[in-house]
Every structure is written in C-alpha cells, then in structure tokens.
Image (cartoon, rainbow, N blue to C red):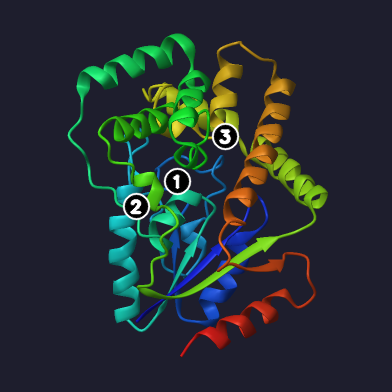
Amino acid sequence: MENLLILTGPTGIGKTEISLELAKKYKGEIISSDSMQIYKKLDIGTAKVDLKNTEIPHHMVDIIDPDKNFSVADFKYMAEEIISEINNREGLPLVVGGTGLYINSLVYNLDFTETEADYAYREELNKILQERGSEFLYTKLYELNKDMAEKIHPNNGQRIIRALEILKDGNEKGNNFRQENGDYNLIFIGLNMDRERLYERINKRVDKMIELGLVEEVKDLLDAGLDKGSQSLKAIGYKEVISYLDGEIEYNEMIELIKKNSRHYAKRQLTWFRRDNRIQWFDRESDNLLKKIETYIDSKLD
C-alpha cells in the first residue's frame, strides 16, 4: 500500500514551514493542494514558496497560466500519478495545503466523471448568476441538496452551477463525499491554534503581502491582459485589489477586507476539516511540535 502524508490546516497557520522540515527528515516531496498556487505569476497573494530557495522537490506549483481553468478532477488525476511516482522512488509524498475539495478528492472516493452538458440549462443558470448573484443560486442548490451545498462556498458561482447540472441529470455524486478512500496508508495531520492568535497571524500575513507588492502584482497581471473574470483572480487578495483598482473601495478598506475575508476563510477551512475523524490535530504553538508530529508519523509508517 502506498504511503500518503497530508498536512492541512487553516490559511496563515504556517503549514509550509513544517512541511519543509518533515520533507527533509522523511525523504519527502511536497505536492501542493492549494488551488491558487497552481497558477504561474500569482506569487505574493498565494504566499507561494520560493522554489529557487529550497532543495525540496515541489509539485503542483506554477503548472498553468493564470488565464486557464483547473478543476478538482484535474488535481486528482495529476496528484495520484505523482503520489505513485514518489512512492516508487521510496520517498514520502507530502500533500500540503488547505483547499478542502482538493484534499477530499484524494481521501474520499469522489466521482468526477463528466455528464453530458445541458448547454441550454447551463446558459439559463449563468444568466441567473449574472442577474441575481451566486447567493440566489446557492439557496436553490441548498433546497435541492443540503449535503452538496455544504461542500461549496456560496460565492463560487461556477461550482454551484456545476452542482445544479449534476442534480438535474439525476446523478447526485455529492452523496458519495463521505466514502473513505482506503487505497493509501494515510497519515492525516492537521494544524490548529488559538483562534485569536491565528487571526493575528493572518492579519500580519496580509500586511506582509501588501508590503511585498500585492497591488503591483495584480496590476502587472491585468496589464498583461489577464481578464478580471479569470478563475485565478477570484482568490482572496486578488479580487479585493481589483475592487480597489476599479475605484470601488478605498486602499485601507481593501486591506481590511482582505484580512476579514482571510479570517472567514480560515474559519470555513476548520469547519470543513473537523468533519474528518482521521485527522490527527496538533497545536501549532505547542512545545516540541515537530518532534510530536514526527513521533506520530513514525507510528504510522511501516
């Protein structure tokens, strides 16, 4: 059975630092499960690791241009191939990140088989999305299938539309989200900490992103012709900067909005991952944290 270590937790908690240390000890290679770090040129707002300054092999980072779309099914297919390759090299694959659906695609038996698209229905839903917003469609989805709705953020209009299409086809794949995948020797680790302390870290992290030039990064992307509606620019940090550049909000309001949205995202991430009892949680501020995690990993490895 192939080994698989997953390290997750809310945004801003410091997963990267811990993952690099673990990779050094266990001949590990890191597979990013961050849905925005896959994009080239989105560096500051995604807190992307500087690949030039680490000898640890990284995968699923900087793999597509920011004007392209990338699905959960794409991630699952690519990540599973990489996991097998790393095991074949007698290394330890470390999936690191906080995108819940990406991680679930590996630890649950999710079916991403595409159903034949009903383009008329999709066009109708897109029109509703433009005219009435994602919250309206989310309410519709919630009424039809609460379980599916709870797996999707209310602002993610395209994923809501896809879920509604699946329901219309009578193929409610969302009901299979809790079927555990037993293909791996799974070592599932979560990092958490006092919420107020976490929020402080997030706020400081946003200040650092602004200092490093987040606004300039977004300007450069737009100046290079990247459409504001691109999937990549829907990420927290990028969409708020666009609102500022468009004159919709003031500079200080932009910063506070990024912090607020990041804190809310962290809260949603924790809610998501607490549903999985396989996760062994560790306090990020615990004494001898690395040693405690290593002891747990050693107990799970053959």
Q: Whole-Å distance between the Cαs marked 1 and 2? A: 9 Å
Q: Position of residue 5 (x, y in %)?
A: 48, 72
Q: Are marks 1 and 3 in contact (CB under 8 Å)?
A: no
- Which residue is found at the position 64% from the left and 51% from the top? 270
Label of residue 75 in the image: 2
Q: Choose the circle earlier in sequence order: 1 or 2.
A: 1
Looking at the picture, which amino acid does disc 3 mark? Ile
Indicate which disc, 1 or 3, sits on the residue closer to the N terminus: 1
Say whether marks 3 and 2 touch (CB < 8 Å).
no
Under tag 2, what secondary structure?
helix
**Secondary structure category for the residue under label 3:** loop
Quarter of the image for residue 41 reads: top left
Disc 3 crowd rating (10 Å Cα; few below 14, some 14-19, many 20+) is some
* Residue 31 falls left or right of residue 252: left
| Image x and y of residue 233, in percent | 46, 30
**The one of 257 and 149 positioned closer to us in this rendering:** 149
Q: Amino acid at mark 2?
A: Phe
- The answer to whether marks 1 and 2 mark residues whose Cβ atoms lie closer than 8 Å is yes
Distance from the alpha carbon under mark 3 to that under mark 2: 20 Å
Residue placed under numbered mark 1 in the picture: 35
Residue 173 can be seen in this image = yes
Instruction: Report the front residue among 10 and 12.
Output: 10
Q: Position of residue 173 (x, y in %)?
A: 33, 46
Relative height, residue 85 to residue 139 (above, below): below
Quarter of the rendering occupied by the N terminus: bottom left
Using the image, determine if residue 105 lies above or below residue 174.
below
Pointer 3 residue: 236
Task: Say which residue appears at 50% left-offset and 37% top-offset.
Answer: 146
Badge 1 element: loop
Please tell me which residue lies in front, 148 or 283: 148
Dot 1 amino acid type: Ser
Q: Nearer the viewer, residue 149 or 262?
A: 149
